[in-house]
Amino acid sequence: MQTIIFALLALVSLFSAIMVVTRKNPVFSILYLVLTFFCFAGFYVMLGATFLAAIQILVYAGAIMVLFLFVVMMLNLREPEELEGKNTLWQTMGAVVAIGFGLLVLAFLGRSPGAGVPNFQPGEEAYVMGGAKALGKLLFTEFVFPFEIAGVLLLAAVIGAVALAKRKRV
Amino acid sequence: MVIGLNHYLILAALLFTIGVVGVLTRRNVLIIMMSVELMLNSANLTLIAFSHYLLNAVGQVFVFFSMTVAAAEVGIGLAIIVTIFRNTESLDIAKLNLLKN
């Protein structure tokens, strides 16, 4: 059962990821990326990270993708075809380099299965570990300082985004 | 067949590679940004898979912070894209050659 769900999610996520990078119209890319993020949330649930799965859907599939969509609508692009001209040399070279990189990573994984981690199946405790209760306890005790810094980072991002996007009065 | 750590690592590597292809071959700056998001997410998947199979919750805390940083990055990045569009009337990165030569 778990294998079937994993295979299904993997196929859908790979397909939609390929669609994200091949669509001409950014709106379709965004919609496929939302599908990819839902698949990621499914993987997180399978791995027992239920809290992060919820955050994934709320923050990524919800907030970030709406922001992307909003920017596309706001910029009001003309025909998207005119943007992509003929394939230049660096694009072909980029594709070759990227696929070579992927083969390299896969070869490394094949050489050292699991990067030296014993391939065991964790029991129930792995599913308690990723819940909101356990993760919240960890965040507010051991990682409380990084948590506060993350808040400051978000504040800086908000101010920076407003300062960048504001129309200059000339 | 039982799903193990390897399956997740290979899947994350494939998704990361698709993201790299997107960054290196596309010319639309919005799609490049989306490919970066894809790469970030596949790295997150690796962290959560390791966290699950090593029974260590710190990996998930790390993913939490990585998501925070990704949210900040998208906010700033899209503001920069809006500024680029305002200056060049296009999203083509080939037109961004102000610092050439």
Image (cartoon, rainbow, N blue to C red):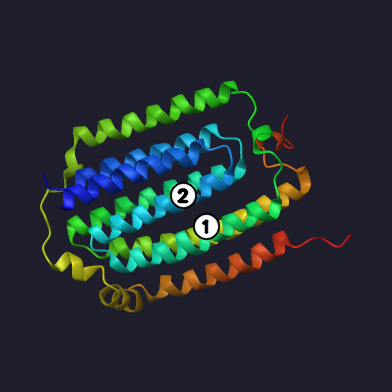
- Which amino acid type corresponds to the residue marked 2 in the rendered image? Leu
Mark toward the start of the polypeptide (2 vs 1): 2
Q: Position of residue B38 (x, y in %)?
A: 44, 47
Residue at image location 55% in from the left, 26% down from the top:
A91
**Numbered disc total:** 2
What chain letter is assigned to the residue under label 1? Answer: A
Residue B1 position by quadrant: top left
Residue A123 position by quadrant: bottom left
Residue at image location 25% in from the left, 75% down from the top:
A134
- Tell whether label 1 touches label 2 (CB within 8 Å): yes
Q: Is residue A11 above or below residue A121?
A: above
- SS of the residue under disc 2: helix
Residue A116 position by quadrant: top left
The furthest residue to the top: A89
Residue at image location 26% in from the left, 44% down from the top:
B9
Residue at image location 46% in from the left, 34% down from the top:
B21
